[in-house]
Amino acid sequence: MKRKLILDVDTGIDDAIGIILAVKSREFDLLGITTVNGNVSLDQATDNTLKVLDLLGETNLSVIKGADAPLIRPHFFEHGVHGEDGLGGELKDILPSRPAEEGFAPDFIINSILNFPHEVTLVMTGPLTNLALAIKKCPQIVHYVKEVIFMGGVVKGPGNVTPTAEFNMVVDPEAVKIVLHAGFNDITQVGLDVTRHAILKEDHIQAIENPVIREYIDNSTAQYRKRYFKRNGVDGCAMHDPLAVAVAIDKSLVKTEDFFVDVETRSELCDGQLVCDFQNRLEQDRNLSVCTEVDEAAFLRLFHSIVSS
C-alpha cells in the first residue's frame, strides 16, 4: 500500500519542485496539499500550488488553505528569492483551473490523522503555523500521526535570512516551539546543514528528460540560481524543500542524530535560531531527529529519475 501523505507548503520556487517530486514519485497516497502563509501570501501560495498541479495534469488532488499569518508576528515574505509571484515569474500570467477546496488546513490535518491513525506522514516545507494550530486544537494528534518531516532551521551553520536563522523558523518561531514541545514520537528536521549540499545545477536541469518539467524548472529557478551564486559563490541553487520530500521517499539519503532542540523566540538578534543540545548539557529528553549528512549524488539520482518520468 502507498503511504498516506499530506504536503504542507508556502509554495515558492523550491516548494513547487517539492510538489512535482511528491506527485510524480507515485510513492504516496496524497491525501491533500495544505497551504500556509510564508514565502508569499496564503492566497498566492494557494494559487501557485494549483498552477503547479495543473502543469502536472493533477486536477483532482485536494488543496486546502490554512493560516494566512504567523501565530503572533507580522507577515514576512521572501520576494527577493522567489519573486513577487513566488515562482520566479514563470506562471504569473496563468490562472489556476480551479479554486481551493472548502475547509481549513489545520482541521484537515487533524481529521486525516484521526481517520487514518498511525498512517499519515506530514511533510512540512513552509512555516509550521498550520501544524501548531492543529496541535493547539487537538493535542492528541501527536500520538496518532505516523511521522513528521519538516524543512527548516540550521544547527551548525549560518542562517539564510538572519546570521543565525533559516526562513521558515524566522517567520513563525512560536509555531516551531509548539511543534518541538508537542511530544511527537517521530519527527525529523531537514535543515540547511544538509540542503546546502543538495545543489541543482544547470547540467542537472538539462538532463531532465521530461521537456515540460525541464522547461518549467529551468525558467522558474533562473533568477534563484543567479542570486544563489551571488550570495554563496555556488553555481546552482539549494533544493531545500525537494530534499524534505526526498527524505519522505527514502530516508537512507540522509544520516540523522537525535537531540534535544529548542527555538529562540525572545532574542533581539537570534529569533528563529534552532538551539541543538549536542552535549546534552540541558539534560532534556531528545525531541528531534536532526539530519546531519546527505548523500547528494543519491539524492540527485532519485530526483532525476522521478522528474524525468
Image (tube, rainbow, N blue to C red):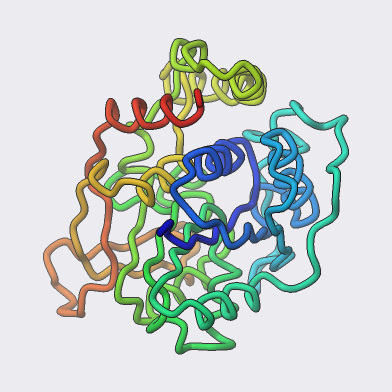
Residue 150: name its quadrant: bottom left
Q: What residue is shown at x 38% (from left), y 76% (from top)?
A: 118
- Residue 160 % position (x, y): 47, 41
User: Is any part of residue 270 visible from this angle?
Assistant: yes
Above or below, 7 relative to 221: below
Total numbered badges shown on the rendered structure = 0
Q: Is residue 1 left or right of residue 105?
A: left
Above or below, 127 relative to 180: above
Residue 127: name its quadrant: bottom right
Q: Is residue 275 left or right of residue 165?
A: left
Q: Is residue 103 left or right of residue 112?
A: right
Q: What residue is shown at x 44% (from left), y 53% (from top)?
A: 152
Q: What residue is shown at x 23% (from left), y 45% (from top)?
A: 252
Q: Residue furthest front?
A: 1
Given residues 204 and 165, the one toward you in this image is 204
- Residue 273 % position (x, y): 41, 58
Tell me the quarter of the image containing the N terminus: bottom left
- Residue 237 % position (x, y): 48, 26
Q: What residue is shown at x 44% (from left), y 52% (from top)?
A: 151
User: Is any part of residue 271 visible from this angle?
Assistant: no
Above or below, 47 relative to 290: above
- Residue 170 % position (x, y): 53, 57
Given residues 34 and 182, the one toward you in this image is 34
Given residues 65 and 209, the one toward you in this image is 209
